[in-house]
Amino acid sequence: MPSQSAYIVAARRTAIGRVGGLHRNRRIEELCAPLIGVALQDSGLEPAQVDELIVGNATQGGNPARLIALAAGLPETTPAATLDRQCGSGLDAILAAARAVSLGDAQTIVAGGAEAISMAPWRVAKPRSLQQLPAFSATSRAPATSAKARPTSNHPKRWRRSSALAAPSRTPTRCVRISRPSRRARVSASSARSPLCAPTQKRRATRAPWHPTSRIWRSRLPTCPMAP
């Protein structure tokens, strides 16, 4: 089967913030729509020339790529798909776009990863009875007539188990004993090897400078100005 080469002609990203911080009030389509517009300007393409939008996302649920496509001004006929491979979702979206272009299924595809953790929907434990509501706080807890009818999310042991879900992310660091400066150095070295970061390598030291006001790492790729 004949194939053609696929190229990345433009790349943009937002500034990285923490949960409940810089982007806490921005929905995922509000974060991504300006980036798509600026990336299309950088590449000299019109929205009507985009054949497909592929977005990697692991927290929103549904198909946020469709909302992003409409918010970015892409035609309603432009298909949009969301891929969920957890931490590899963004890379998987780019690989899927490259495969589609190589096989001749499309000429221009916008692809990347996007997360809006502060605006992501919550997942709560389902109560055992349909007459009970999920417990978010002590004031919203439904009264239980017996131990068996008590919602599973109210059980203290269940709460301890759910809070332990964050432990695996810290376990490798403790076992391997990688310090924070060492992690930053490894991330900087890995980013420096990326072709997308090559134009900005000369003006950076071992890591990106720390911004004292917004408490974020300055982007290694060109950022898109966001409205407050």
Image (spheres, rainbow, N blue to C red):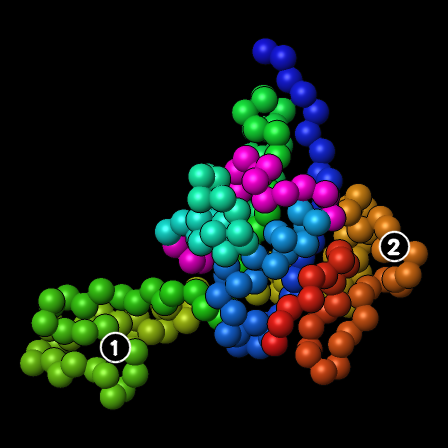
- The amino acid type of the residue labelled 2 equals Gln
- Residue pictured at 81% horizontal, 71% vertical: 209
- Pinpoint residue 158: horizontal percent, then vertical percent: 30, 70
- The amino acid type of the residue labelled 1 equals Ala
Residue 1 lies left or right of residue 205; in this view the side is left
Given residues 43 and 150, the one toward you in this image is 43
Quarter occupied by the N terminus: top right
Residue 80 lies left or right of residue 18; in this view the side is left
Quarter occupied by the C terminus: bottom right
Q: Is residue 86 above or below residue 101?
A: below
- Pinpoint residue 71: horizontal percent, then vertical percent: 50, 56
In the image, is residue 78 part of the stretch drawn in magenta?
Answer: no
Q: Which mark is residue 201?
A: 2
Residue extending furthest bottom?
139
Residue identifier under label 1: 135
Per the model, the C-alpha gap separating discs 2 and 1 is 49 Å
Q: Give the mark count.
A: 2
In the image, is residue 50 part of the stretch drawn in magenta?
Answer: yes
- Residue pictured at 53% horizontal, 63% vertical: 30
Which marked residue is nearer to the observer: mark 2 or mark 1?
Answer: 2
Which quarter of the figure has residue 143? bottom left
- Pinpoint residue 205: horizontal percent, then vertical percent: 89, 63
Q: Are marks 2 and 1 in contact (CB under 8 Å)?
A: no
Residue extending furthest left?
145
- Looking at the rendering, the stretch of residues picked out in magenta corresponds to 42-61
